[in-house]
């Protein structure tokens, strides 16, 4: 299986990161975070053991650990810098999160078969073989465990714009649409309970194309972000607009072992 990123890339990304902002799910600006949270809450997270794979600097684990104090939260990542940031974040937020520095493809792990819920946010699309990476993630689940997987929708407008503005960032993603995402689950022996595109639009996802935050393309992306904010405000006031392969920012699936 080809890996579209490596450890050095993630270490570099985390070393450049400034500031530790917590997850915010309030207000129209954070509407998309709220959509993701609502999908997560479709799984019962109380009194559970929960693992995030690729948890470097995760904003989700500290948030969930505080919301569900009866549950046990663990984050695994192979990036030293990512693990260090998550530990610091958890400490700062007074959240009970165990951070483990480990490669998810390790042959044998004491963590295998020990979690009720295994989650990931933007990890599995960085490999050419989705079935293979989901199968690796699946090994951490108990027999009746549930998996939550979220990826950016690089098959639509966001992917086309990312390819135009940063070929380097685009090439680090496998541009799945919902069909190929669901097929990957099938290949991994996972049955999708719920899955689909998530959110009507959010061009804020394009910020990863512009580490320098300058230039004409950056300014153009700011106009798109402003348009997204108007749409998020409308959705916050009047309800969700339809999701689509072209404009939705994310694809998600909640699945269990077949
Ligand atoms: C897009 S980032 C996810 C970041 C994060 N959880 C978040 O959204 O806040 C992908 C993460 O997967 C991790 N990763 C990639 N390959 C991995 C592997 N083989 N084992 C463990 N972690 C890996 C990277 O180090 C990186 O932290």
Image (spheres, grey):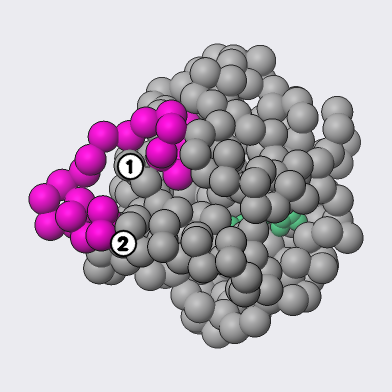
**Is the residue indicated by label 1 positioned so its CB lies within 8 Å of ligand 1?**
no
240 is within the stretch colored magenta: yes
Q: Identify the mark at residue 158; answer none if there is no mark.
A: none
Magenta highlight range: 230-254
Residue at 70% x, 52% y: name it: 166
Q: Is mark 2 on a helix, strand or loop?
A: helix
* Residue 217 in view, yes or no: yes
Q: Which residue, as the protein is rendered here, is positioned at the far left?
A: 238
Q: Which of marks 1 and 2 is nearer the N terminus?
A: 1
Q: Is mark 1 on a helix, strand or loop?
A: loop
Q: Position of residue 186 (x, y in %)?
A: 59, 15
In the image, taking residue 58 as reference, residue 174 lies left or right, namely right
| Mark 1 → mark 2, Cα distance in angstroms | 12 Å
Q: Give 97 or 33, whichever is nearer the viewer.
A: 33
Q: In which quarter of the image is the C terminus?
A: top right
Q: Where is residue 210 in the image (x, y as percent from the top left)?
A: 64, 65
Residue at 55% x, 84% y: name it: 92
Where is residue 110, by image quadrant? top right
Eyeballing the image, is 183 above or below 66?
A: above
**Is the residue indicated by label 2 positioned so its CB lies within 8 Å of ligand 1?**
no
Q: Identify the mark at residue 229; answer none if there is no mark.
A: 2
**Count the marks: how many?**
2
Q: In which quarter of the image is the N terminus?
A: top right
Residue at 45% x, 54% y: name it: 203
Q: Where is residue 130 in the image (x, y as percent from the top left)?
A: 69, 27
Where is residue 89, by image quadrant? bottom right
Residue carrying label 1: 200
- Circle 2 residues within 10 Å: few <14, some 14–19, many ≥20: many
Q: Position of residue 2 (x, y in %)?
A: 86, 32
105 is within the stretch colored magenta: no
């Amino acid at each position: 299986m080809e890996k579209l990123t490596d450890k050095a890339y993630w270490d570099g990304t985390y070393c450049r990161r400034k500031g530790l902002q917590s997850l915010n799910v309030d207000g129209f600006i954070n509407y998309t975070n709220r959509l993701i949270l609502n999908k997560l809450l479709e799984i019962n997270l109380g009194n559970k053991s929960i693992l995030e794979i690729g948890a470097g600097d995760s904003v989700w684990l500290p948030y969930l650990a505080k919301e569900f104090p009866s549950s046990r939260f663990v984050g695994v990542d192979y990036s030293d810098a990512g693990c260090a940031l998550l530990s610091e974040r958890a400490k700062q937020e007074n959240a009970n999160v165990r951070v483990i520095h480990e490669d998810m493809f390790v042959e044998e792990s004491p963590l295998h078969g020990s979690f009720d819920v295994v989650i990931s946010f933007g990890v599995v699309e960085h490999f050419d073989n989705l079935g293979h990476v989901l199968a690796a993630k699946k090994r951490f689940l108990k027999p009746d465990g549930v998996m939550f997987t979220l990826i950016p929708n690089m098959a639509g407008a966001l992917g086309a714009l990312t390819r135009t503005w940063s070929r380097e960032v685009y090439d680090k993603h496998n541009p799945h649409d919902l069909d190929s995402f669901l097929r990957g689950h099938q290949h991994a022996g996972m049955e999708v309970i719920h899955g689909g595109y998530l959110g009507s639009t959010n061009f804020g996802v394009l910020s990863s194309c512009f580490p320098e935050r300058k230039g004409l393309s950056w300014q153009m992306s700011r106009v798109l972000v402003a348009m997204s904010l108007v749409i998020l405000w409308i959705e916050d006031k009047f309800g969700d607009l339809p999701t689509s392969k072209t404009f939705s920012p994310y694809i998600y699936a909640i699945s269990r072992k077949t």
